[in-house]
Amino acid sequence: MSGKMNEQLWHQLTQDVMTEMREWRAQHPKATLREMETELDARLNRMRARMLEDMALASAAADWTDAPAGAPPTCPDCGQPLQVRGSDTRTLQTQSGQALHLKRQDGTCPACGAGLFPPR
Amino acid sequence: MAPVRPVGPGFFPLDEELALLPGNLSPWLQEALVRLSTHIPSFARAARELAFFTGVAVHRNSARRHTERAGALLVAHETAEAARVLREHPAPPCAPDTLVIRVDGAMVPLLRGQWTEVRTLAVGEVQPAEPSADGPVVCGPRLAHRERNGGERKQAGG
């Protein structure tokens, strides 16, 4: 793993959800269960997206600049270690339209040349 | 001169590792959209249902595109699998040369004066004839039964 998961962030996210929901409930003593579901899901989905993003990026495949010799990802065609070319951020939508921003490195194969795969 | 490969984005190992699909929806959302689109005979309605259940708005054309791509992948997978079966010619399951099949039905009483029909399928493996003083004799076949009463099935092997 290149990046470790941010445990402090997870605790903070959880804490925020609990605090916000406590306050919301205090301000809405007559709320229906339907309203509670909506409010809770909105906050849980925000937390979910941040945790997903954090977990996805906690991989050696996200950033392999400092990977030891023999550890970089290899070309699926010829097995040669890939060379880092740069990095790019891909944005995906997940539950409730929350965005996942995945900044990851891309590489080329020195044996096969640049542009190994068609654009996604 | 050797052809030059087009220059495009490089290879994103993280995308491969996470098994990301083309497009801007997470894999779970794509699966949800395709499932809804296959169960609901309208891409526009499927997109609306996805928005209700996940809070993600997609255009009906996106629903169509994702679903057709998933369908094409399924067809390609099944075609490849069929080609593999033909290529490898797996041995057919061991079965006798001749089978005797008999189907019958009978009404049987249930509780409180009710009756139900039970259908029976008997499949027998014909045994080779054995010599005897009176000439060749074919012994009773090895039988397997399948009985059905409505949706209920009972099976027995002999």
Image (tube, rainbow, N blue to C red):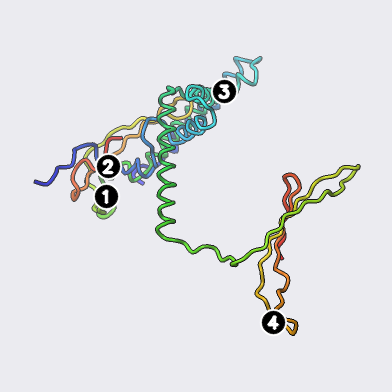
User: Residue B69: image x %, image y %?
Assistant: 40, 35
Q: Point out the frontmost of discs 1 and 3.
A: 1
Type of amino acid at the residue the image marks with label 3? Met
Element at label 2: loop
Picture residue at 74% right of the left edge, 50% below the top: B148
From mark 4 to mark 2, how far is it between C-alphas? 74 Å
Q: Is residue B55 left or right of residue B129?
A: left
Q: Do pointers 4 and 1 mark residues of a single chain? A: no
Corner quadrant of residue B150: top right
Element at label 3: helix
Q: Earlier in the sequence, mark 1 or mark 3?
A: 3
Element at label 4: loop
Q: Do pointers 4 and 2 mark residues of a single chain? A: yes
Q: Which residue matches tag 4? A: B131
Asked whether the beta carbons under mark 2 and mark 1 sit within 8 Å of each other, the answer is yes
Type of amino acid at the residue the image marks with label 2? Phe
Q: Point out the frontmost of discs 4 and 3.
A: 4
Q: Point out the frontmost of discs 4 and 2.
A: 4
Q: Is residue B60 left or right of residue A24?
A: left
Indicate which disc residue A75 carries.
Answer: 1
Tag 4 subunit = B
Q: Single out the residue that lies furthest toward the bottom.
A: B133
Closer to the camera in the image, A65 or B41: B41
Q: Do pointers 1 and 3 mark residues of a single chain? A: yes
Tag 3 subunit = A
Picture residue at 62% right of the left edge, 20% below the top: A34
